[in-house]
C-alpha cells in the first residue's frame, strides 16, 4: 500500500505517548531486575525508584487521558482502515483500550500492594503518599500477584502495539506511524 497522507496526533499527545512508553519500558525492566535481588540497601533503593516511576506513569497516564478527551485522536485514514481485516481493526481498538485500562491498573495495584505490605510510597523522599488499604499480609500477597500479572499483561499489549506499528511501517508502508512520530510530516 502506498503512503497515505495522515492526520497527526496533538503534539502534547505525541510527547506523552513517548514519555509514557519510556517510563513503562524502563519501569518494567527495573521491576524484573529488582524482584529477585537479595535483600539489601541497593534493592530497597530500586524499589523506591520503581514506586516513583509508577507514580510518574500514573501522572503521565492521567495527562494522556485528559489530552485524549480534549483533543481526540485522528481517525484512521479510510484507505488504511478499509485495507485492514476486521480482526485487525478489532485488535487495534482492543489493544488501545486494554493499554489505557492497564496504564491505571498497574500503578494503582502497585500502590495498594505497597500500602498493604506496610511500605508507604515516599515520593522522591519528600512526600509520603496516602495508603490505599490497611496493612495486611494476606491482602499484600493478593495485590502483589495482581500487580505482577497486570504488569505482564501490559508488557504483552505493549509488544503487540509495537508489532502492529512496525507492521504498518515496514510491511504495509502506509505512513500510519507518522501520526504519533516527531518531526515534520
Image: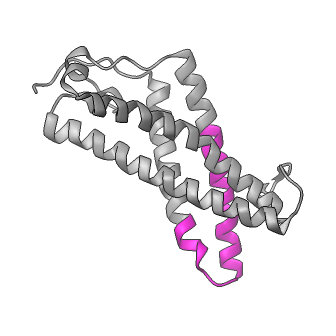
Write the start and end of the magenta stretch as one range. 31-60
Tell whether position 40 is magenta.
yes
Comparing 41 with 109, the one in front is 109
Left or right: 108, with 88 as reference point: right
Residue 120 seen: no
Quarter of the image with the N terminus is top left
Residue at the location (26% across, 23% down)? 185
Comparing 154 with 65, the one in front is 154
Residue 163 placement (x, y as % from top left): 29, 46
Comparing 96 with 91, the one in front is 91
47 relative to 122, above or below: below
Residue at the location (64% across, 84% down)? 38
Residue 155 placement (x, y as % from top left): 46, 54
Colour pattern? one colour
Could you say which quadrant of the image residue 172 lies in?
A: top left
Tell whether position 119 is magenta.
no
40 relative to 140, above or below: below
Amino acid at each position: 500500500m502506498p503512503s497515505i497522507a495522515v492526520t497527526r496526533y496533538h503534539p502534547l499527545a505525541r510527547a506523552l505517548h513517548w514519555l509514557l512508553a519510556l517510563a513503562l519500558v524502563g519501569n518494567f525492566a527495573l521491576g524484573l531486575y529488582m524482584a529477585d535481588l537479595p535483600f539489601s540497601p541497593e534493592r530497597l533503593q530500586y524499589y523506591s525508584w520503581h514506586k516513583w516511576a509508577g507514580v510518574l506513569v500514573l501522572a503521565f497516564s492521567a495527562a494522556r487521558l485528559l489530552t485524549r478527551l480534549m483533543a481526540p485522536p485522528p481517525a484512521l485514514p479510510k484507505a488504511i482502515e478499509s485495507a485492514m481485516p476486521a480482526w485487525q481493526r478489532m485488535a487495534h481498538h482492543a489493544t488501545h483500550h486494554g493499554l489505557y485500562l492497564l496504564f491505571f491498573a498497574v500503578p494503582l495495584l502497585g500502590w495498594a500492594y505497597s500500602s498493604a505490605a506496610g511500605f508507604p510510597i515516599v515520593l522522591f523522599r519528600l512526600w509520603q503518599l496516602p495508603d490505599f488499604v490497611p496493612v495486611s499480609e494476606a491482602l499484600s500477597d493478593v495485590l502483589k500477584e495482581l500487580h505482577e500479572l497486570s504488569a505482564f499483561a501490559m508488557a504483552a499489549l505493549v509488544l503487540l502495539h509495537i508489532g502492529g506499528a512496525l507492521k504498518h511501517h515496514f510491511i504495509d508502508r502506509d505512513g500510519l506511524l507518522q501520526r504519533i512520530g516527531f518531526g515534520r510530516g
